Amino acid sequence: MPIRIYNTLSKKKEIFEPKDPGKVSMYVCGPTVYDSCHIGHARSVIVFDVIARYFKAKGYALTYVRNFTDVDDKIINRANELGLDIKEIAEKYIQEFYEDMDAINVERATIEPRATEHIDAIIRVIEKLIEKKIAYSIDGDVYFAVEKFKNYGKLSGRRLEDMEAGARVDIDKRKHNFFDFALWKSAKPGEPAWDSPWGQGRPGWHIECSAMSTQYLGESFDIHGGGKDLIFPHHENEIAQSEAAFEKPFAKYWIHNGFVNINQEKMSKSLGNFMMIKDVLKLYHPEAVRLFLLSNHYRSPIDFTDKALSEAGAGLDKIYALLERIEKTFGPTSDNDFEQAGNEKYWKKFCAAMDNDFNTALGIGNLFDAVRNANRLLDKHEGDLSSQTAEAIRSERTQIIKMGKILGILLESPLEYFDKKKSQSIEKQSIDSAEIEKMVHEREEARKSKQWAKADQIRKQLADMNILLEDRPEGTVWKIGD
RNA sequence: GGCGGCAUAGCCAAGUGGUAAGGCAGUGGUCUGCAAAACCAUUAUACACCAGUUCGAAUCUGGUUGCCGCCUCCA
């Protein structure tokens, strides 16, 4: 089945046809490394991580480029604030980015280029634009002349005439048009700078993506992605630069993810409501964060609330609980039969959802269908599993894991998952597990001798300590409440 | 002002022409000494409102209302 993708350029879902059959080239705008990553970065990175995983699972040879913007005004400001070199700042936040991404199970892109390592390539593109008289230099700055590119505005649906009316006021008189943007910025004293035909300076923001995408993916490639806010001006400008320079269509499909709101408000500096990834991870399991972020369609806004995160955590518990149950029934399972699950019903439904513009929300629904069905089979046939039923349950487990792999969840063993969860809660709530074990044991003894009142009293005591019990056939298990 | 998006049960959310996935919460039941977990059943005469197209619309068209985003750095 073909993959269909909503293309911002056409504002329609289109059937995905890669430039080279069987291969996918994808460029996604990565972070400007001047601060820690927040939950909005996480969403964007995770959305494209899932898209990348899915392409690979479908058998495409994927080349995925995600850049680091490691020179720009914000980095320079931050470096000045802290009295550091911009290289040190960039390095610090790149390392932090990797720590965050590893923590939320984001796979590395194929190539992760940095702007400062591609200055030559950037200069070459600018020179080309100047040759074609689409760019002009003034006092060491170089600007792109938007009026020279006739399709300017085709991605964002803006027309220069419409935009100009309100914008004429504080126009930089040196620029030919208010919307002309910098390709090269001359260096002010103390700023990082590179030699160029226009003197010492540094690249403008947009040009690095044109230069690097061309270098690694070619002048035309399949997919370009990023947050919705990048549509204008960043991506609009990239198209203008690349198509003007190379006279070929730039990216064929444009994918943009929606924002994360915090309690219905946009994250903003004035509200001070940025949720940093590392802080979120102190409270929630990384896979719960992923499950939450993928539970809405990637183009819609999503509201970050404690309730929503807890619910995602409850859902994750439910899946792991099933996996644990299956392991208890069948013993530790291997992934040998992994490939064989390809034909199975839930995986197929999941793929159909993903094929339709990466509908992870629907896909997660399919995953829960499989969970419910496997539980149902276990309930119905407990203690009396025919080989056919066992086979069905094994297959469903395999399918669940396979879906999880695309979503980047269910990567732990159930034992690990629940143990980790337990020990974290123990730590957080300073619970004495030896004491609890003792009480649980005491209660089991009481139950054996049918001293129900005593057993219930101990259970009540534990409940007051936020300890919940499950009397399972194989013995009593205790958990910590939320 | 220009451009764009959204409005589905208590909450979150999928669904772009054929009669409402899934999750959380709730209620009843099975199981259990009682619970918990799990399962089963149940929970939107119906998809903001109005008009239209159609045999048929949450889904298409026009309008109304409300909310939101982008247009300055932004995932």
Image (cartoon, grey):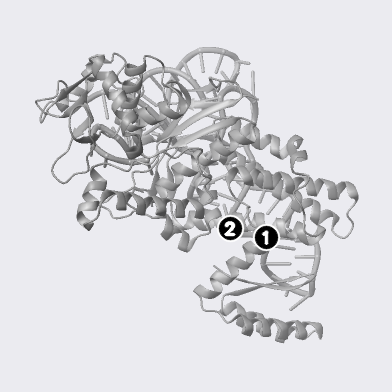
Q: Is residue A340 left or right of residue A127?
A: right
**What is the chain letter for disc 2?**
A
Residue A110 or residue A49, whichever sits in front: A110
Give the quadrant of residue A322: bottom right
Tag 2 near tag 1, CB within 8 Å: no
Is A23 situated above or below A85?
above
Is B60 situated above or below A25?
above
Q: Is label 2 on the same chain as label 1?
A: yes
Q: Position of residue A173 (x, y in %)?
A: 9, 26
Comparing labels 2 and 1, the label whose residue is closer to the camera: 1
Gap in angstroms between the C-alphas marked 2 and 1:
14 Å
Q: Quadrant of the C terminus of chain A?
A: bottom right
Residue A340 or residue B10, whichever sits in front: A340
- Name which of mark 2 and mark 1 comes first in the sequence: 2
Q: Is residue A302 left or right of residue A269?
A: right
Q: Quadrant of the N terminus of chain A?
A: top right
Residue at label 1?
A: A414
What residue type is disc 1 on?
Pro
Is the residue marked by circle 2 packed among few (<14), some (14-19), or many (20+) residues within 10 Å?
some
Q: Position of residue B60 (x, y in %)?
A: 48, 20
Question: Secondary structure under badge 1?
Answer: helix
Q: Residue at x 64, y 36 (%)?
A: A57
Is the residue marked by circle 1 packed among few (<14), some (14-19), or many (20+) residues within 10 Å?
many
> In this figure, what is the number of numbered marks?
2
Q: Does residue A383 appear anywhere in the picture? A: yes
Q: Which mark is residue A314?
A: 2
